[in-house]
C-alpha cells in the first residue's frame, strides 16, 4: 500500500462533528460533480466506505456502489459511488459553486480543516519520505478552484503554490516541515509520527554527510598545503639556497618532508616529542611561512 493510501485510510476513519461532515462531503462532491451527476471514484476502500456513510448520515441516501478492476498498470480495484436522487438538494446543501464552495462551508478553522481533508481524499497524493523526495500535490481541472485551495492551504502558512501542468493545475507543497503540518491539519496523527521520524532521520543523515564532506575538504586542504610546503623546501635545495634558512627553520622543514600529510598541530607535537624542544602550532606555521617567503623571493628573481 502506498503512503498516500495509508494516509487516506487513516483520515477516512476519523470521527467528525455533523458540521465537519458537511464540509468534508462538500469537498468530495465538489470534485465529483460533473454535468449534473455525482459520481465519486476512488481506489481506496476506506474512502469509499466513508463517502457511502456521509451520504447516508447527512441525506439518508444509499449510493449505488460498483467495483471494477482499474486499467492502470497496478490494476487496482476502483470503487464508484453514484447518487441518483436529491442531487439539486445535495448540491445546494453542500454549498457547491463553480469555483469553490459557499463561505459557510469553511467559516472557521475546524470546518476548513474538514474541507481540506475531503479535498485530500479526492485529489491529493503525498510521497513516502522514506523512498522519495518530499512532495505533496493536488490535481485540478479548474484554475480558479486550484487557486482557492492554494489560499486555503496558505491560511495555515503551508507555502503552497499553483503550477500549470499540461491540461491540469497542480497545487503543491515541497517543504518537509510544511507537509508534516498539513498531515496534522487533516488529523493524520499516525502518518505524522511516521513522517517526522523519517524526516528527522534524513535530516540527521544529511547533516552527517555535510560534516563528513566538510571534514574531508579540510583534510584535502591540509594535504595540498603540506605538498606546497614540501615543494618549496625541495625548490630551495635545488637552487642551493637551503642554507639561508635558520637552524630552527631547517628543523621544521626536515619534519615537514618526513611527515608530509601531518597537520600543523600534529607536526608541532611530533617535533616537540622527538627533539625535546617544545614548539607550538603557530611556531611551526611561522617557520614554514618563512620558508615559503624565501621560495617565492627566489622564484621572482629567477623569472626576472
Image: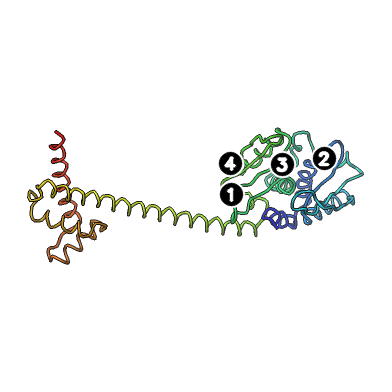
Query: What number is the disc on residue 116?
Result: none
Dot 3 or dot 4, earlier in sequence: 3
Residue that mark 1 sits on: 134
Q: Which residue is mark 3?
A: 107
Q: Residue at x 74, y 38 (%)?
A: 103
Question: Is residue 263 toward the left or the right of residue 304 in the image?
Answer: right
Crowd band around label 1 with a 10 angstrom C-alpha radius: few (<14), some (14–19), many (20+): many
Q: Marks 3 and 4, Cα distance to the nearest angstrom? A: 21 Å
Q: Are marks 3 and 4 in contact (CB under 8 Å)?
A: no
Residue that numbered label 4 is attached to? 159
Which one is earlier in the sequence, the residue at label 2 or at label 4? 2
Q: What residue lies at 35% left-to-right and 51% top-to-bottom?
A: 217
Determine which quarter of the picture holds residue 293: top left
Q: Nearer the viewer, mark 2 or mark 3?
A: 2
Q: Quadrant of the N terminus?
A: bottom right
Outermost residue to the front:
238
For label 2, the residue is 33
Q: Of marks 1 and 4, which one's residue comes earlier in the chain?
A: 1
Q: Nearer the viewer, residue 200 or 3?
A: 3
Amino acid at each position: 500500500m502506498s503512503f498516500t493510501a495509508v494516509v487516506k485510510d487513516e483520515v477516512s476513519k476519523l470521527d467528525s462533528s455533523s458540521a465537519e461532515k458537511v464540509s468534508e462531503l462538500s469537498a468530495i462532491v465538489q470534485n465529483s460533480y460533473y454535468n449534473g451527476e455525482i459520481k465519486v471514484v476512488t481506489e481506496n476502500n476506506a474512502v469509499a466506505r466513508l463517502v457511502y456513510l456521509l451520504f447516508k448520515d447527512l441525506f439518508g441516501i444509499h449510493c449505488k456502489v460498483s467495483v471494477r478492476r482499474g486499467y492502470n498498470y497496478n490494476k487496482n480495484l476502483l470503487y464508484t459511488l453514484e447518487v441518483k436522487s436529491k442531487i439539486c438538494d445535495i448540491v445546494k446543501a453542500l454549498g457547491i459553486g463553480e469555483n469553490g464552495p459557499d463561505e459557510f462551508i469553511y467559516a472557521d478553522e475546524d470546518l476548513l480543516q474538514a474541507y481540506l481533508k475531503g479535498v485530500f481524499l479526492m485529489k491529493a497524493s503525498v510521497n513516502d519520505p522514506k523512498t522519495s523526495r518530499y512532495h505533496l500535490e493536488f490535481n485540478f481541472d479548474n484554475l480558479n478552484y486550484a487557486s482557492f485551495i492554494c489560499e486555503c492551504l496558505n491560511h495555515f502558512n503551508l507555502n503552497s503554490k499553483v503550477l500549470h501542468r499540461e491540461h491540469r493545475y497542480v497545487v503543491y507543497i515541497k517543504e518537509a516541515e510544511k507537509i508534516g503540518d498539513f498531515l496534522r491539519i487533516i488529523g493524520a496523527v499516525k502518518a505524522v509520527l511516521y513522517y517526522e521520524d523519517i524526516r528527522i532521520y534524513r535530516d540527521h543523515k544529511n547533516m552527517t554527510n555535510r560534516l563528513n564532506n566538510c571534514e574531508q575538504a579540510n583534510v584535502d586542504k591540509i594535504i595540498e598545503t603540506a605538498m606546497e610546503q614540501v615543494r618549496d623546501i625541495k625548490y630551495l635545495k635545488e637552487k642551493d639556497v637551503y642554507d639561508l634558512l635558520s637552524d630552527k627553520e631547517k628543523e621544521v622543514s626536515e619534519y615537514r618532508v618526513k611527515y608530509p600529510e601531518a597537520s600543523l598541530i600534529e607536526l608541532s607535537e611530533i617535533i616537540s616529542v622527538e627533539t625535546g624542544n617544545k614548539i607550538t602550532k603557530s611556531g611551526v606555521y611561522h617557520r614554514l611561512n618563512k620558508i615559503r617567503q624565501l621560495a617565492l623571493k627566489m622564484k621572482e628573481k629567477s623569472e626576472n
